[in-house]
Amino acid sequence: MIVLLGLAGSGKGTQGKALSELFGWKWLSVGQVIRDTGEYTEIVNRGELIPDDDVIRLMNKQIEKAEAEGFDIILDGYPRDVYQAEWMMENMAEKIDGAIVLEVSKEELYKRLALRGRDDDKEKESIDRRFEISEQNICSILPLLEAKNIPTEHVDGSGPIDTVTDRLINVIKKLNPNATIQEADVNGGEIEKSYGE
């Protein structure tokens, strides 16, 4: 299991999906899981966060399902904060191969979010609030991973998507030596080429 961390627009979703297809793993995005429920739209659009216990329940259900189906997992944006990270360290630390932090400049992030066009990406004040919270949380999560001897890698998320994917492939192979690229990905080679998904 790989934990993919980064601010909104850093490419966690785009890269997580591409990597899951390349390695034949399951991509589990906390944002996508929450959006798929349809229960939290107003909260998300205000730039606010879903209660931790709800997130843990939703994500744990999806993780257990993926494991039961025999998949290795790329977690996108989960754990989101210290509470969730502490729960993970107590309940599944041994399953985590490592964490990757995607690093992209704020200037580039604003451009990507404008392209993406989701309702929760339209207000700069809302975006800035999310950035601030996410930065604080990532800084708090990393020491918890370190305390459990879970390696963390920082990867430059800027530049062409294929270039970033290549960087991530090399890091994943380092974190999980058993990881191998599949002969053909599930979309027949059609991997997303834009951060404006």
Image: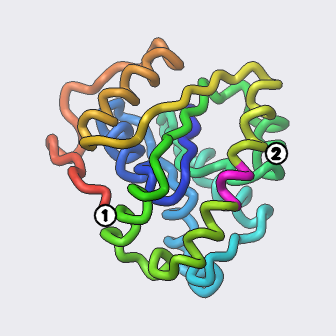
Nearer the N terminus, badge 2 or badge 1?
Answer: 2
Q: Is residue 138 above or below residue 9?
A: above
Q: Residues within 10 Å of mark 2 (few under 14, many from 20)?
A: some
Q: Is residue 67 visible?
A: no
Q: Is residue 51 above or below residue 61?
A: below
**Residue 135 part of the magenta segment:** yes
Magenta region, main secondary structure: helix
Q: Residue 149, position in %: x, y?
A: 75, 19
Q: Quadrant of the N terminus?
A: top right
Horizontal side of residue 97 vs 166, given as left or right:
right
Judging from the image, what secondary structure is the residue with disc 1 in? loop
Q: Residues within 10 Å of mark 1 (few under 14, many from 20)?
A: some
Q: Is residue 149 above or below residue 18?
A: above
Instruction: Find out whether the residues at labels 2 and 1 contact each other: C-beta distance under 8 Å.
Output: no
Residue pictured at 45% horizontal, 80% vertical? 122
Residue at which label 2 appears: 87
Judging from the image, what secondary structure is the residue with disc 2 in? helix
Q: Amino acid at mark 1?
A: Glu
Residue pictured at 15% horizontal, 43% vertical? 188
Q: Quadrant of the C terminus?
A: bottom left
Q: Amino acid at mark 2?
A: Trp
> Marks 2/1: CA distance?
31 Å
- Please report the bounds of the magenta region as a residue range: 133-137
Horizontal side of residue 139 vs 177, given as left or right:
right
**Residue 26 part of the magenta segment:** no
Q: Is residue 48 visible?
A: yes
Q: Residue 157, position in %: x, y?
A: 41, 41
Task: Report the coloring of the rendering.
Answer: rainbow
| Badge number at residue 197 | 1
Q: Residue 93, position in %: x, y?
A: 74, 30
